[in-house]
Image (spheres, rainbow, N blue to C red):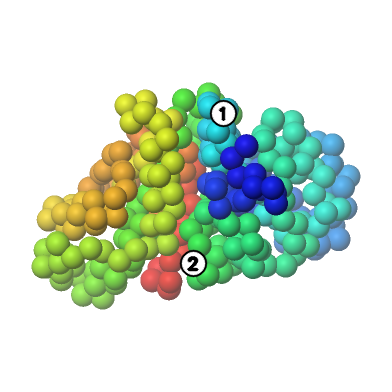
Amino acid sequence: MKGCDGLGLNLKDYLVVGISSRALFDLDEENRIYEEQGLAAYSEYQIAHEDEVLAPGSGFALVKALLNLNTISDKRYVEVIIMSRNSADTSLRIFHSIEHYGLDISRAVLSGGSSLSNYLEAFDVDLFLSADSHDVEQAINSGFAAGRIYTDPILNYDPKHQIDQIRIAFDGDAVLFSDDSEKIYQQKGLSAFVQNEKENARNNLNKGPFAQFLKTISDLQKNFDETNSPIRTALVTARNAPAHERVIRTLRAWNVRIDEAFFLGGITKKDVLKAFDPHIFFDDQPTHAKPASEVVPSAQVPYKNIN
């Protein structure tokens, strides 16, 4: 079996996704109890309802789709790890729900209220998804791809629908790429940004927090026929010509694959994302990520302190 070296499973051989229980399941009511009544009331509620199955949350469809990769060949490509601030005593409802939905998840970090970011390296996590902004910010600052997933209901979206292809959409600046160019736009305006991108069209953009994750996904795609790949990616960026050239040349230099690209030039991303229908969309700016979360699962990437 892939990853078995006589000393146990080597997680470096897999795409590893760490996801919080509130990102995987709908725990908004339980979180409200915790925030309004405290830990004791939350624990009592969870234990009293531990035989009740939780509804899918915003990250459910992505996890289901990724785990589906393990069923299409003899190889195992993906490991998903529950990373929760729950204690072991309050976690049974989560594991019962995982079993109910047939999710192939057997590993968990239950920190009992402590920060989860310290454990990302120990589990070789490639992507961390959580509804907790503090945990996500710590993960980003520690060099991991991480997103704060929006948990509000998504209009006309069925997280349990049939999965034919994993679809992941990324913003460009401050997600795949560094925020260097975006800072120029914020500090000096659009004209200065465009001029900078024209002058540096043949100079690669620096890597952002999701550059390595995209590389990992791109390498994973190489295991499959390009014309019938079970994974499809998209770049959805506010850039347009002439600022597009630097992006294209950078991705080429990184030797990574992006299947679709949308250079929108200020057009709202929401409608394009609804058409692409990703299992998740990553954007650094709440002004883009929040509206997108109304139609597709979305996560904000709090890269540095530019928002």
Residue 77 seen in this snapshot: yes
From this view, report whether residue 115 is shown above or below residue 156: below
Specify few, some or many for label 2: CA neighbours under 10 Å numbering under 14, 14-19, or 20 or more: some
User: Mark 1 touching mark 2, by CB under 8 A?
Assistant: no
Quarter of the rendering containing residue 230: top left
At 67% from the left and 34% from the top, the residue drawn is: 103
Numbered marks: total: 2
Above or below for 193 versus 97: below
Is 243 displayed left or right of 66 in the figure? left
Along the horizontal axis of the image, is 128 left or right of 197? right
Where in the figure is residue 214, as x and y percent of width and height? 40, 50
Disc 1 on helix, strand or loop?
loop
Residue 209, position as x, y percentages in the image: 42, 62
Q: Is residue 132 visible?
A: no
Work out how far the residue at label 1 is from the one at label 2, CA to CA, in angstroms: 32 Å
Q: Is 21 placed above or below 284 here?
A: above
The tag on residue 74 is 1
Per the rendering, the mark at residue 143 is 2
Write the residue at 28% across / 39% down: 260
Closer mark to the observer between disc 1 and disc 2: 1
Local secondary structure at mark 2? loop
Seen at 30% across and 66% down, the residue is 206
**Figure check: 125 above or below 97:** below
Q: Residue at x 48, y 52 (%)?
A: 299
Q: Amino acid at mark 1?
A: Asp
- x, y percentage for residue 297? 49, 43
Q: Nearer the viewer, residue 155 or 159?
A: 159
